């Protein structure tokens, strides 16, 4: 791995106990990976695609999955595959995938994949088709590889990905990670308060529409500034407020299309958006 420079071995100590919520996703992945080194390649798991607003635990889940299942976690940075010579990028992606096959059973993590593949659509006009060929090689490997490599890709905006990327048999499931519920926030609060050695009995701020990353940020700032949680919360602006339209659009897209990461089954958006009605003038003479 060090000699190639194409993949990075994650050496963290994260585990599912450090991650609140996501019960259905945790159960799905651990059941799919329960048998190491399955002899029949058709019974080996392929991976999952995770979609959510920023800060909902996608990357944290990827890092914890390897430790929970006893597999090494390899991190693939698409940008590091780009080469300056003709054909070097294509050779790099093939070499990286060969290394992942040789390291199996393992977990292969590709973070923010929609940004890494953002130039695929107009690749012929921008980079002479290099990104398109890289994407084609990766798609073929996702569909045809027989090694025990569990691929976990994270994404914040699936509309930027080509539709063939998320089709069946490339991944075992496409999961949507929504903002944490009240009970899940309670678990996240307990984890973060214990992590930063804060008083668990102190009053907590109103965390409506907060993500897990924002709860962690509130606890870290309280420890850093030596102030109560209610005061440190004044320095946190939720992403559901700064990007409310984007979050709602993502929820509406995922409803009926993705699996729910918190409970078994298809995700449904419980927040109904009110329909806009055309305003009619009371005076019929007014056009």
Image (tube, rainbow, N blue to C red):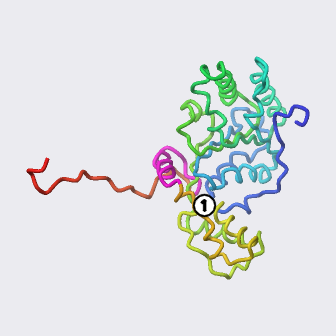
What residue is shown at x 66% (from left), y 55% (from top)? 57
- Residue 111 in sight from this viewpoint: yes
Label 1 neighbour load within 10 Å: few <14, some 14-19, many 20+:
many
| Tally of marks | 1
Residue 17: x and y in percent read 73, 63
* Residue occupied by mark 1: 211
What residue is shown at x 35% (from left), y 56% (from top)? 274
Q: Is residue 139 above or below residue 239?
A: above
* Residue extending farthest bottom: 201
Q: Is residue 249 left or right of residue 143?
A: left
- 117 or 95: nearer the eye? 117
Q: Is residue 209 left or right of residue 281?
A: right
Residue 198: x and y in percent read 74, 76
- What segment carries the magenta color? 243-262
Residue 34: x and y in percent read 74, 48
What residue is shown at x 73% (from left), y 62% (from top)? 18
* Residue extending farthest front: 286
């Amino acid at each position: 791995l060090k000699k190639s420079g194409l993949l990075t071995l994650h050496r963290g100590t994260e585990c599912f106990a450090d991650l609140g919520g996501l019960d259905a996703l945790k159960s799905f992945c651990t059941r799919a990976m329960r048998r190491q080194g399955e002899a029949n390649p058709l019974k080996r798991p392929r991976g999952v695609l995770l979609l959510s607003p920023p800060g909902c635990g996608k990357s944290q889940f990827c890092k914890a999955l390897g430790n929970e299942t006893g597999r090494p976690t390899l991190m693939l940075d698409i940008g590091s595959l780009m080469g300056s010579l003709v054909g070097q990028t294509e050779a790099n992606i093939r070499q990286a995938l060969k290394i992942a096959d040789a390291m199996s059973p393992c977990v292969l993590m590709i973070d923010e994949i929609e940004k890494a593949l953002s130039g695929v659509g107009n690749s012929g006009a921008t980079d002479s088709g290099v990104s398109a060929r890289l994407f084609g090689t990766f798609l073929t490997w996702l569909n045809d590889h027989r090694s025990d490599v569990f691929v976990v890709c994270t994404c914040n905006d699936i509309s930027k990905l080509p539709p063939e990327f998320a089709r069946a048999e490339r991944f075992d499931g496409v999961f949507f990670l929504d903002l944490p519920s009240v009970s899940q926030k309670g678990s996240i609060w307990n984890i973060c308060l214990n992590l930063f050695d804060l008083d668990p009995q102190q009053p907590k701020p109103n965390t409506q529409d907060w993500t897990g990353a924002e709860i962690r940020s509130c606890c870290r700032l309280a420890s850093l500034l030596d102030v109560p949680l209610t005061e440190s919360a004044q320095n946190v602006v939720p992403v559901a407020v700064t990007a409310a339209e984007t979050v709602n659009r993502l929820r509406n897209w995922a409803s009926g299309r993705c699996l729910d990461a918190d409970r078994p089954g298809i995700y449904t958006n419980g927040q109904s958006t009110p329909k806009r009605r055309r305003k009619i003038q009371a005076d019929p003479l007014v056009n």
